[in-house]
Image: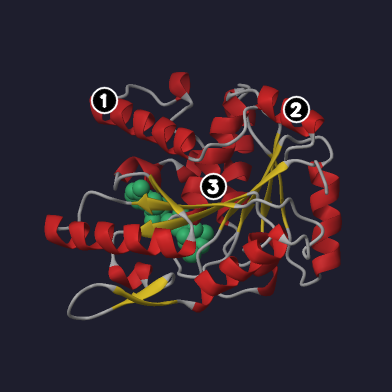
């Protein structure tokens, strides 16, 4: 079993749920904690994560500043072996490796998702997004059946527990993160809460609070900055302070190993 970098995979076969936004913020938050972070963008068409980090590098050059960041690459091919080789190379001197994946069914996204140490699935508060994980009854809102994707992850975890998937650790922590919250009507939100809780028991994921809907998340992209880049964002209003706190809560909710404990766990062969 490998003791390489902790693999965090942002995946959801639905488009536009906030994978890239949360992936970037997570990568930078870890870099701020002193971790060595690598990031691989598997969405070779949109390349949001890659472009975000390119913009960040450009801002550092333009302003002549040094910002914590991730070592990044995009993989545009279709070979699992090549991707694994890139993962090994980039992971060699990293504590964490972050994968951003496209919002559609994709063989490479499945490959990394089924081998994730932490699988993060951002979901908007909508049954349209929820459908990716499970179908709910139209009258009762009870979960009727699991989606193909939930079955896929369920199977992968079973195989890992039996060590049939050899290039992955045994345990996968699957975290469903609510993204862009705040605009849903309370009753709808309660129904989603209820259905998510029920489904989380059946499928074995955890639910963590994510980012709320804020314009700032859309505005930061051109500069590649994040809410954590305090001294470089200009005057911050209170809402941005709240936003930064919500980002910290999100990262804490992912329960990632800290760099120190990660080394310790690796030594003990627990991971
Ligand atoms: N918390 C948020 N508040 C406001 N806007 C957001 C938030 N999260 C994401 N967005 C915006 O929503 C859009 C989709 O987000 P993002 O690109 O992160 O999703 P994605 O899941 O990676 O999409 P895709 O499946 O197309 O790759 C972007 O315009 C992004 O700026
Ligand atoms: Mg994306």
Nearer the camera: disc 3 or disc 2: 2
The quadrant of the image that shows the C terminus is top right
Query: Disc 1 and disc 3: Cα gap in Å?
Result: 24 Å
Q: Residues within 10 Å of mark 3 (few under 14, many from 20)?
A: many
The kind of secondary structure element at disc 3 is helix
Image disc number at residue 250: none
Q: Residue at x 65, y 54 (%)?
A: 116
Q: Which tag, 2 or 1, sits closer to the chain's start?
A: 1
Image disc number at residue 23: 3
123 relative to 4, above or below: below
Q: Residue at x 29, y 59 (%)?
A: 125
> Residue tagged by mark 1?
237
The kind of secondary structure element at disc 1 is loop
The kind of secondary structure element at disc 2 is helix
Image disc number at residue 263: 2
Side of 138 relative to 114 (left or right): left
In the image, the residue with mark 2 has its CB under 8 Å from the nearest atom of ligand 1: no
Q: Residue at x 44, y 21 (%)?
A: 230
In the image, the residue with mark 1 has its CB under 8 Å from the nearest atom of ligand 1: no
Q: Nearer the viewer, residue 148 or 14?
A: 148
Where is residue 115 shown, x and y percent of the image? 70, 58
Where is residue 161 shown, x and y percent of the image? 69, 58
Q: Nearer the viewer, residue 6 or 59?
A: 6
Q: Which tag, 3 or 2, sits closer to the chain's start?
A: 3
Query: Disc 3 and disc 2: Cα gap in Å?
Result: 23 Å
Side of 5 relative to 177 (left or right): right
In the image, the residue with mark 3 has its CB under 8 Å from the nearest atom of ligand 1: yes
Q: Residue 262: in sight, yes or no?
A: yes
Q: Nearer the viewer, residue 77 or 225?
A: 77
Q: Residue 17: in sight, yes or no?
A: no
Q: Are marks 2 and 1 in contact (CB under 8 Å)?
A: no
Q: In terms of image quadrants, where is residue 35?
A: top right
């Amino acid at each position: 079993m490998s003791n390489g970098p902790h693999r965090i995979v942002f995946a959801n076969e639905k488009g536009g749920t906030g994978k890239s936004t949360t992936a970037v913020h997570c990568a930078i938050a870890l870099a701020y904690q002193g971790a060595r972070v690598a990031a691989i963008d598997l969405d070779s068409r949109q390349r949001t994560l890659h472009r975000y980090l390119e913009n960040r590098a450009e801002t550092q050059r333009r302003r002549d500043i040094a910002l914590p960041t991730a070592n990044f690459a995009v993989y545009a091919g279709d070979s699992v072996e090549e991707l694994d080789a890139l993962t090994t190379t980039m992971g060699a001197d990293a504590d964490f490796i972050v994968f951003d994946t496209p919002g559609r069914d994709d063989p490479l996204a499945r490959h990394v998702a089924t081998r994730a140490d932490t699988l993060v699935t951002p979901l908007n508060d909508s049954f349209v997004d929820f459908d990716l994980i499970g179908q709910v009854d139209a009258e009762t809102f009870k979960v009727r059946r699991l989606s193909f994707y939930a079955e896929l992850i369920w199977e992968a975890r079973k195989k890992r527990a039996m060590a049939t998937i050899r290039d992955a650790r045994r345990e996968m922590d699957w975290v469903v993160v609510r993204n862009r919250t705040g605009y849903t009507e309370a009753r709808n939100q309660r129904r989603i809460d209820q259905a998510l809780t029920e489904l989380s028991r059946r499928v074995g994921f955890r639910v963590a609070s994510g980012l709320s809907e804020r314009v700032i998340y859309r505005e930061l992209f051109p500069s590649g900055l994040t809410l954590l880049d305090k001294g470089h964002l200009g005057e911050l209003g209170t809402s941005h302070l709240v936003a930064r706190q919500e980002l910290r809560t999100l990262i804490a909710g992912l329960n990632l190993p800290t760099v120190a404990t990660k080394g310790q766990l690796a030594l003990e062969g627990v991971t």
